[in-house]
Image (tube, rainbow, N blue to C red):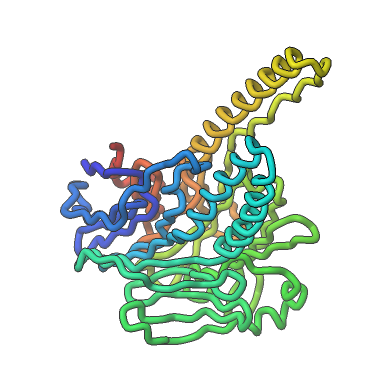
Amino acid sequence: MATLDENCYAATIDEEKNIFYALSQHYMYKGDLKTGEILDRYKFMDIIEKTENDYVDPNLFIIPREVTTNGYAIVEFNPRKLEASRNMKKYSDILIKGAGDAVFDVAAESEENNEIYAKESKTEEFYLIDFNKKSKTHYATYNLDEVTFVGLNESEAISYNKYTRELVYEDFLSGTEKKKISYAGFFNQHAALKELKTEFGPRILKNDVVNYRFNDTINQKFIDITFNSKTNEILTRDEILYKNIIYQGKAQLLYLNSEDEGIYFANAECNIPSQPEMQELPEMKGTSAKKLAAWQEEVNKIQEEYKKKSEEWIKQTQQRENFCTLHIFGDQTMTQKLISIPKAEKGTIVNKDKVLITRANEVALYDLNTGTEVWTIDTNF
């Protein structure tokens, strides 16, 4: 039975070598696939202590992205964004409590810091984890307006150039560019999509099947499109309103070591708890010091209660897969259901006939032929 030090964000398996790798915010693990025993671990990042200037757990700024079967991983972390976030709260607290001319200086510093935060929110910093060498090195810095990270395979990191609409494959050890794949033809054939922003790069689901997410800012919605990159035929199109993005399921299937033929389709049913609403604040009843103090006390109580409920909701919905069921189908019309998997929203198809599910506290493998669970590696700690 595997015991990990913290929640698992990504995992991959190699049935031939009988091993699995798992990735958390601070650790990478190598384990025995049959027994679930942890064979080795590497702590690549120190735990960040929460301060009075943190709105949320600062470790949430560490984002594990991908892990491979040969012991490499990509993790995202921008320390400048974390620092700017802390400064936002620091300046906000000072301005709320402050008085006098010094407040104007703090206000100017706060405005400058807000600009820094906006800039760093569009800057992705990536680190390459080498499990075999137990090392962490800075890999790349991307401006999200221009380039975004897409994925990792056994030897290449994949990025997307939003201007040229090309996927770029680069050897992540040597930095040598290996190839480019252009999707300009798809946009030429579907010209209306050119007007929409692409928040994330295209993801090759399998062979010639590609998924794109577009941002329709005018109609306030995201559009997910899956298409055949050879024929440019759109296979599926799903629309998600901004207001529903938290609550609506987004099924995602990736492929690992799968044969060329065969593609699966999926949807996810989610029942995410509603975000709490703050109670209406009371009106002031008089301006005497005593009445103002009583009114402020009541307001503080309402705001503190709302803050507590919001923090609980954020913590609860960080593992949104707990509220979802993933349905996998063998056909595009989604009538031939193969399996329904609880507490899942995305999965990785392995060797064509299995699907790997990564949850916060476990990794599970399911058989698509029988619709049953093959094994579960528990990661409770």
**Residue 28 or 118: which is nearer the viewer?**
118
Location of residue 215 in the rendering, given as x and y in whole percent from the top left corner: 69, 63
**Residue 353 or 183: which is nearer the viewer?**
183
Location of residue 37 in the rendering, given as x and y in whole percent from the top left corner: 18, 47
**Does residue 232 show up?**
yes
Could you tell me which quadrant the N terminus lies in? top left
**Does residue 209 show up?**
no
Residue at 49%, 69% in the rendered image = 150
**Residue 237 or 120: which is nearer the viewer?**
120
**Residue 236 or 136: which is nearer the viewer?**
136
Q: Residue furthest right?
A: 286
Q: Residue furthest front?
A: 101
How many labels sit on residues? 0
Q: Is residue 202 above or below residue 372?
A: below
Could you tell me which quadrant the C terminus lies in? top left
- Judged left or right of residue 50, residue 264 is right
Q: Is residue 147 above or below residue 69?
A: below
Location of residue 300 in the rendering, given as x and y in whole percent from the top left corner: 64, 24
Q: Is residue 201 above or below residue 34?
A: below
Q: Residue furthest top?
A: 290
- Judged left or right of residue 39, residue 274 is right
Q: Is residue 127 above or below residue 54?
A: below
- Judged left or right of residue 169, residue 200 is right
Residue at 52%, 69% in the rendered image = 203
